[in-house]
Amino acid sequence: MVVRHQLIRRPPHALWEVLRDESRYSDWVVGTHSTCPSGQEVWPRPGATLHYTVRLGPKEFEGTTVVRRHDPPHALELEAHSGPLGSARIAFDIRPWGENTLVILDEHPLRGVGGALHNGVVDFLMQQRHRLMLGRLARVVEESAPARSEQGADV
């Protein structure tokens, strides 16, 4: 299990604007080349599915991510299916932190080979991936929503 946190210098509603936009996931999810909605449900409602492509050199791998829990403004929980590797639970705990947002990301394998082979080395690699991913998410949110002082409001 890997748990990591990130302070985003915008309010929770700005983070939710990015999380609601399935076309933005490849902007911040490390390793994801492209995403597109699939299925009938509207993202990110429970049951909604996002199809993703990962490129590793000349190879492409495809998978899907399903929304399991959608509780704005507090939580978003996803299950990422990676074919023979199995699936993982990815949970975003979203907390107001003054005028900012504290995001706590918790990811662990659920099914398949990924869970059977899960170990400390995998956790270390996932920590590095999450550091990059949460940094990218913060940048995307902060660039997408102007700071209050930029809107002319008092800080």
Image (tube, rainbow, N blue to C red):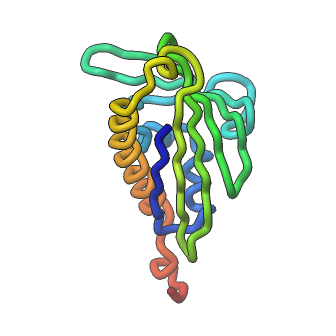
Res 39 → quadrant: top right
Residue sticking out furthest to the bottom: 154
Residue drawn at x 47%, y 20% is 114
Q: Determine if residue 83 is in view.
A: yes
Residue drawn at x 49%, y 42% is 24
Given residues 50 and 132, the one toward you in this image is 132
Tally of numbered tags:
0
Q: Determine if residue 50 is in view.
A: no
In the shown orientation, is residue 1 left or right of residue 61?
Answer: right
Given residues 53 and 102, the one toward you in this image is 102
Given residues 17 and 111, the one toward you in this image is 111
Res 36 → quadrant: top right
In the shown orientation, is residue 39 left or right of residue 18?
Answer: right
In the shown orientation, is residue 83 left or right of residue 76?
Answer: left
Q: Position of residue 30 (x, y in %)?
A: 38, 37
Residue sticking out furthest to the left: 57
Above or below residue 41? Residue 11 is: below
Q: Position of residue 56 (x, y in %)?
A: 30, 21
Q: Position of residue 122 (x, y in %)?
A: 37, 30
Q: Position of residue 12 (x, y in %)?
A: 60, 63
Above or below residue 142? Residue 123 is: above
Above or below residue 112? Residue 129 is: below
Residue drawn at x 38%, y 53% is 135
